[in-house]
C-alpha cells in the first residue's frame, strides 16, 4: 500500500492497478526515476509507463539450511535428506567418566556406560560383564561370619565355614594310670597296662566346648555339634548344614539386566533400550 512506499519530492503515491505508484505532481517539472524511489525489502524498482514502480522480486524457492535453524543446547544441526534437523551431539568416550581400572570403549558408535553410572543396592557391588555394568553379590568371606566359641572360620569351596579348633592331648586331662594317644584324629585317654579298671567319662575332664562320649568302651572328648543357631550370617545368605557343618551360602537371585532407570547418561543424551540393553544416545 502507499503506507509502505516513500515517494520522492514533488510526487505523491497513488494506487494504480492495485499497486502503489509515485505520481508526479503537476507543479513538478522533472519526472521521477528509480533513483528517487526507496522500495521495501524483497522488491525492486522498475519504470512502468514512465513512472518508477516497486515490483516484487521473483525469487527461486530455496530449501532451508542449517543457517535457518536454531537448535537447542546439547544438539547441533545436521542436514538429513536435504533438510536441516537438530540432533544430539554424538557422545564420545571423553563424555564418560570411567571408574578406576576400567577403560571406555565405543560399541556400535556409542560409549558403553561404566560402574560410575550404576547405583547398586546394599550387599552388592558393581562389576563389568561383557562391557556392561552389573550389580552382583559380594563374595562372602570369613570377615562376614561370627563363629561361636571354640570354633574358627575357614573357607571351604569358596564359602565361609565355622569349624572346631583341632583338639590335642594338651587340651585333655587324663586320669591317673592312663595315657593319651590320638585315635582317628581325636585324643583319647587309654588305660595303662598296669591299671585294672578302664576309665569312664567321670574320670575325664574335657576342655571347654567339648563333652565326654564313650567310644568303643573308652571316654573321648568330642565337640558339641554346631548348628545354624550358633552362627551369625550376613544379609542375603542362608544356612544349610553341609557334611554336618553349617555354611554361609549366598541366596540365589535372578540376574537382572540393567534398565534405563539404573543408567545416568551425560548431559545432552538420553537413555534408549537397544537389543535389551540401555544406551546413551
Image: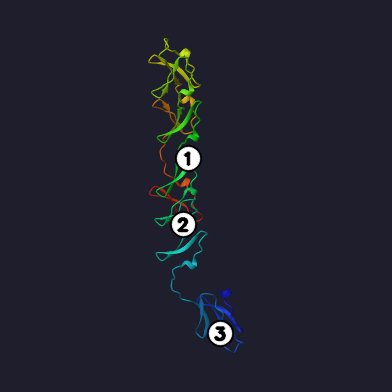
Task: Tell me if 108 is positioned left or right of 8 in this view.
Answer: left
- Can residue 124 be spotted in the picture? yes
Q: Nearer the viewer, residue 193 or 138?
A: 193
Could you tell me residue 50's position as x and y percent?
A: 51, 86
Q: CA distance from mark 2 to mark 3?
A: 61 Å
Give the vertical position of 235 relative to 27 (above or below).
above
Task: Say whether disc 2 or disc 1 marks the residue closer to the N-terminus.
Answer: 2
Residue drawn at point x = 47 percent, y = 63 percent: 77
Circle 2 or circle 3, nearest the eye: 2
Please report contact status of discs 3 and 1: CB closer than 8 Å, yes or no: no
Residue drawn at point x = 57 percent, y = 74 percent: 4
Q: Which mark is residue 35?
A: 3
Outermost residue to the front: 194
Q: Which residue is mark 1?
A: 124
Q: CA distance from mark 3 to mark 1?
A: 83 Å
Q: Which residue is mark 2?
A: 93
Task: Tell me if 26 is positioned left or right of 216 in this view.
Answer: right
Amino acid at each position: 500500500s502507499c503506507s509502505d512506499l516513500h515517494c520522492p519530492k514533488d510526487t505523491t503515491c497513488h494506487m494504480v492497478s492495485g499497486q502503489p505508484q509515485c505520481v508526479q505532481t503537476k507543479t513538478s517539472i522533472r519526472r521521477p526515476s528509480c533513483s528517487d524511489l526507496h522500495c521495501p525489502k524483497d522488491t525492486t524498482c522498475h519504470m512502468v509507463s514512465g513512472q518508477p514502480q516497486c515490483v516484487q522480486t521473483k525469487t527461486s524457492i530455496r530449501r532451508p539450511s542449517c543457517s535457518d535453524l536454531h537448535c537447542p543446547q546439547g544438539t547441533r544441526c545436521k542436514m538429513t535428506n536435504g533438510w536441516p534437523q537438530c540432533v544430539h551431539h554424538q557422545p564420545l568416550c571423553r563424555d564418560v567418566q570411567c571408574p578406576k581400572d576400567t577403560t571406555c570403549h565405543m560399541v556400535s558408535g556409542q560409549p558403553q556406560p561404566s560402574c560410575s553410572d550404576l547405583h547398586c543396592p546394599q550387599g552388592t557391588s558393581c562389576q563389568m560383564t561383557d562391557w556392561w555394568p552389573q550389580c552382583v553379590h559380594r563374595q562372602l568371606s570369613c570377615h562376614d561370619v561370627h563363629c561361636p566359641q571354640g570354633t574358627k572360620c575357614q573357607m571351604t569351596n569358596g564359602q565361609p565355614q565355622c569349624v572346631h579348633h583341632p583338639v590335642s592331648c594338651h587340651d585333655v586331662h587324663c586320669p591317673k594310670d592312663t595315657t593319651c594317644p590320638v585315635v582317628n584324629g581325636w585324643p583319647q585317654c587309654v588305660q595303662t597296662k598296669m591299671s585294672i579298671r578302664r576309665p569312664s567319662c567321670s574320670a575325664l575332664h574335657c576342655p571347654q566346648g567339648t563333652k565326654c562320649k564313650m567310644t568303643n568302651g573308652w571316654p573321648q572328648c568330642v565337640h558339641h555339634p554346631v548348628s545354624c543357631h550358633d552362627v551369625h550370617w550376613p544379609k542375603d545368605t542362608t544356612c544349610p548344614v553341609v557334611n554336618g557343618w553349617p555354611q554361609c551360602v549366598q541366596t540365589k537371585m535372578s540376574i537382572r539386566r540393567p534398565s534405563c532407570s539404573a543408567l545416568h547418561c551425560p548431559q545432552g543424551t538420553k537413555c534408549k533400550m537397544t537389543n535389551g540393553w540401555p544406551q546413551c544416545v
